[in-house]
Amino acid sequence: MPSDERVSAEREAERRIEKARRKDDRRLDLSGLGLRTLPESVRKLTLVKRLDLSGNELSTLPDWIARIPKLQVLHLEGNPLQELPGSLVDAKGLTWLNLGMTRLKSMPNWLAELRK
């Protein structure tokens, strides 16, 4: 993705994050923006239950993603993820994790511990 398109994608992500913050939204859709990193401002969204990061260029996730207090559903499909942060095991409310079309070579054992 060219540099100007990446900047535009980051601006769009920040716009959506700010809108979700102002409205106390329970859902945040950052899908298809071509993001390479997850914006730090996402961690301030304490009410988000559903986070859609599908179709981006995320190869890693920050450890703090597990500390989004109400997170229940996390869509990561279509990202070149090669591993998941171990901190996700501490995301106690997480009940749905979509990992389709990623580059994960193996699934961590803690995935079996997700609440059903």
Image: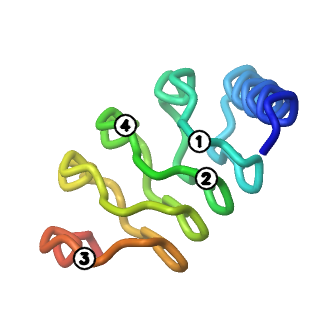
Q: What is the C-alpha distance between the residues marked 2 and 1? A: 5 Å
Mark closer to the chain start, 2 or 1: 1
Pinpoint residue 6: horizontal percent, then vertical percent.
Answer: 77, 34
Q: How packed is label 4: few (under 14 Cα within 10 Å), some, or many (20 or more)?
A: some
What residue is pinned by disc 4? 62
Quadrant of the rendered image containing residue 61: top left
Q: Secondary structure at mark 3?
A: loop
Q: Position of residue 1 (x, y in %)?
A: 78, 45
Task: Look at the numbered disc 1 and give the secondary structure of its residue.
Answer: loop
Say the numbered circle drawn on residue 107: 3
Identify which residue is drawn at 19% across, 55% down.
89
The amino acid on which the numbered mark 2 sits, given as a three-letter code, is: Glu
Density class for disc 3 (Cα within 10 Å; few <14, some 14-19, many ≥20) is: few
Find residue 57 and name its label: 2
- Specify the quadrant that holds the C terminus: bottom left
Between 111 and 32, the residue placed more toward the observer is 32
Left or right, 64 with respect to 22, comes to left
Residue that numbered label 1 is attached to: 36
The Cα–Cα distance between marks 4 and 2, rounded to whole angstroms, is 14 Å
Residue 2 in the image, given as x and y percentages of width and height: 82, 38
Judged by depth in the image, the label closer to the viewer, 2 or 3, is 2
Q: Are marks 4 and 3 in contact (CB under 8 Å)?
A: no
| Towards the viewer: 13 or 106 | 106
> Mark 3 vs mark 1: which is more N-terminal?
1
